Structures are given as structure tokens and as C-alpha cells.
Image: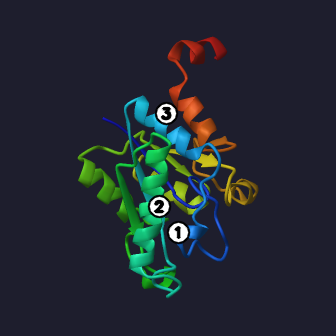
């Protein structure tokens, strides 16, 4: 099974320093849902792993978070895409849970749920904590420059082997490039 793990805010949809607090505020980044559709067509199972501390902060309820994720699923379907699962951490940073990225509990759960090793699984994020969580469990780190990605690149300290792309569509172009093309470039 081919699996890919995507962060949500800043990778699939526009991010906000004030949090995405309603379905109306959830707006896909142009080309992201079509990129997910291309992954599906190539046989990838697409999983989202996202920190959602707005729940613990009281900025939105679990019901609202579910409605946001319903909009994500419905928007993906309209683009011909399918998201197999959304894993989320509803805790605040000071809750000291194991699921909040950069800790890797959420990624371990993905591995268990899908019964796969995460070694080499592409992990796409726009923040250092996204990449750190994946790197610890053996994922291949991909940084996108959408969302907080530009700031993350400037700050540095990326896990070894991190590959940087302008957006999710460019990551997918890279992942789906035919091996013959990759050899010709190398």
C-alpha cells in the first residue's frame, strides 16, 4: 500500500494565525485538492494528521471541527479526490499529550490503523513540528512553502533529507514523476 500523510492547515487549505474556526473559513489552496486526486489515481491512500488546539482553547467545538472536516471531504470529492482518514490532536500545547505534533503519537496511530511501517512514507507539512513528528517515525519529510512554510524554511533546523517544494501540487508532481524522467535528470 502506498500511503502519504498530509498536514491540513497550510498544506491543503489556507492557514490563519487566528485559527480556522468554521467551515466558512476553510478555503482550499488552489490545486491542493486536485493534487490529492492525482495521488488517489496513482494508488496512494491519503491521510491527514493535524493539530487542532483550537478545540482545547475553546475557539471551536468538536462539532464545528467535524463540520470543517466534512467540508474538506465534500470539497475533495468534488475535485475527484478521496481522503482516507483525518487524525487530529484536539489538545493544547501545555496538555503534554502524546498526539500533538512534534510528538509522534498521532503518526504511530496512523501506522497502527493502516497496519504499515511509516519508513519512507511521504510526510508533507508547512511547519517544523509536522516534519519532526514524521521524521522520528521514519517518514520522508517534505516541506511546502504555503502556509507557514516560508517562515519554517527561513528559521532552519529542518530534519535531514527534507525536500522543499512551493506547494502540495509540486510535491505530487515530484512523487508521481516517472522513474525514467528522474534518471534522465540525475
In terms of image quadrants, where is residue 142? top right
| CA distance separating discs 1 and 2 | 6 Å
- Total number of numbered discs in the rendering: 3
* Element class at badge 2: helix
Residue located at (44% from left, 66% from top): 103
Q: Mark 1 near mark 2, Cβ–Cβ under 8 Å?
A: yes
Measured as percent of width and height from the top left, residue 125 is found at 56, 53
Q: Dot 1 surroundings within 10 Å: few (below 14), some, or many (20 or more)?
A: some
Query: Which residue is labeled 1 in the image?
Result: 23
Q: Nearer the viewer, mark 2 or mark 3?
A: 2
The kind of secondary structure element at disc 3 is helix
Q: Quadrant of the C terminus?
A: top right
Residue at 39 percent of width and 78 percent of height: 62
| x and y percentages locating residue 53 in the rendered image | 49, 77
**Percent position of residue 21, x then y:** 55, 76
Residue 180, picture quadrant: top right
**In the rendered image, which residue does mark 2 sit on?**
71
As helix, strand or loop, the secondary structure at mark 1 comes to helix
Q: In the image as oriented, which residue stretches furthest toward the bottom?
A: 58
Amino acid at each position: 500500500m502506498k500511503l502519504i500523510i498530509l498536514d491540513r492547515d497550510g498544506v491543503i487549505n489556507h492557514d490563519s494565525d487566528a485559527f480556522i474556526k468554521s467551515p466558512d473559513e476553510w478555503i482550499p489552496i488552489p490545486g491542493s485538492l486536485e493534487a490529492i486526486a492525482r495521488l488517489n489515481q496513482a494508488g496512494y491512500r491519503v491521510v491527514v494528521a493535524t493539530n487542532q488546539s483550537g478545540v482545547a482553547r475553546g475557539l471551536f467545538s468538536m462539532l464545528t471541527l467535524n463540520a470543517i472536516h466534512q467540508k474538506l471531504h465534500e470539497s475533495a470529492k468534488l475535485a475527484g479526490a478521496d481522503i482516507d482518514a483525518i487524525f487530529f490532536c484536539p489538545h493544547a500545547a501545555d496538555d503534554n499529550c502524546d498526539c500533538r505534533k512534534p510528538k509522534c503519537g498521532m503518526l504511530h496511530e496512523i501506522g497502527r490503523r493502516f497496519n504499515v511501517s511509516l519508513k519512507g512514507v511521504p510526510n508533507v507539512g508547512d511547519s517544523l513540528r509536522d516534519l519532526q513528528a514524521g521524521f522520528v517515525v521514519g517518514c520522508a519529510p517534505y516541506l511546502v512553502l504555503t502556509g507557514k512554510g516560508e517562515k519554517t524554511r527561513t528559521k532552519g533546523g529542518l530534519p535531514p533529507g527534507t525536500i522543499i517544494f512551493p506547494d502540495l501540487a509540486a510535491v505530487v508532481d515530484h512523487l508521481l514523476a516517472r522513474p525514467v524522467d528522474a534518471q534522465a535528470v540525475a
